[in-house]
Image: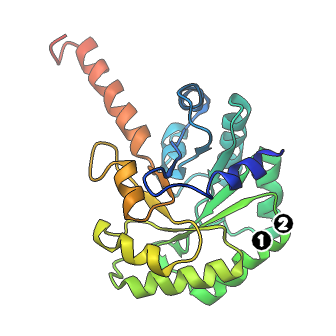
Amino acid sequence: MSHATVFRALHHGRAPEDPLVLPGPWDAASARVFAAAGFPALATPSAGVAASLGYEDGRTPADEMFAAVARIVRAVDVPVSADVEGGYGLAPKELVELLLAAGAVGCNVEDSADGVLKDPAEHAEWLAGVREEAGDRLFLNARIDTFLRGVDDPGAAIGRAAAYVAAGADCVYPIAAPVAVLPLLRARIQGPVNVLARPGEGPSPAGLGGLGATRITFGPGLQRQAEQAVRESAQRLAGRLPG
């Protein structure tokens, strides 16, 4: 059974209190840590990978992002999905080829660029192209940026979700959706729903699952948590914090 098949199966038949939890490795070392902890799959965060490569979020060159994903994939034996931001302006065929060459089993793609929401019909058409090129070789997670971009009406996210699922998305990701609207989104959206969790804040993954999340990702939260731990260690070494 291929890693892509295994990854897709992980999203289905789950109890509400048992969402799929996908830590976000930013390099090979962090990927090994998460895999050794027993997580069945991983999902890279573009912002976390960008930080590890010395770039601001959204500024990583595509070739460097795919190379980083490939290193993470090589480091572990579990499936790895890749956050490829808005697709880097690539045509569906090229995007799929690069993902498969890196060894990814899926991708997360955003529906906004430079802080502006994309036209949902045009984005759905592009997603349909990705689906056609990928077949069943990639799990397509379509991020919905309405809440992130200040559109608070859940109906806007629900409408985009319907268009993206119709285009072939395997899962939709209404990032930054308020916890209070998760039950409504779950009731109105077909298929798996990805929810962002913030380490140490808000409901637990199980709690988010009870509210409607099929799978949980963390964005760059885990990378930033690790960076803070390193910062504190550095300050202790420099004598700025009590040892």
Q: Please tell me whether mark 2 sits on a helix, a strand or a loop.
A: loop
Q: How is the image coloured?
A: rainbow
Q: Nearer the viewer, residue 14 or 20?
A: 14
- The amino acid marked with disc number 2 is Gly
Residue closest to the far left: 242
| Real-space Cα separation, disc 2 to disc 1, in angstroms | 6 Å
Q: Position of residue 101 (x, y in %)?
A: 82, 48
In this figure, which residue is indicated by the disc labeled 1? Answer: 131
Q: Residue at x 61, y 57 (%)?
A: 13
Q: Residue at x 69, y 50 (%)?
A: 7
The quarter of the picture where residue 162 lies is: bottom right
Residue 167, compared with residue 102, is above or below; it is: below
Q: Position of residue 209 (x, y in %)?
A: 42, 57
In this figure, which residue is indicated by the disc labeled 2? Answer: 135
On the rendered image, what quadrant is the N terminus found in?
top right
Residue 37, compared with residue 151, is above or below; it is: above
Label 2 close to label 1 by CB (< 8 Å): yes
Q: Nearer the viewer, residue 14 or 124?
A: 14
Q: Position of residue 172 (x, y in %)?
A: 56, 69
- The amino acid marked with disc number 1 is Arg
Q: Please tell me whether mark 1 sits on a helix, a strand or a loop.
A: helix
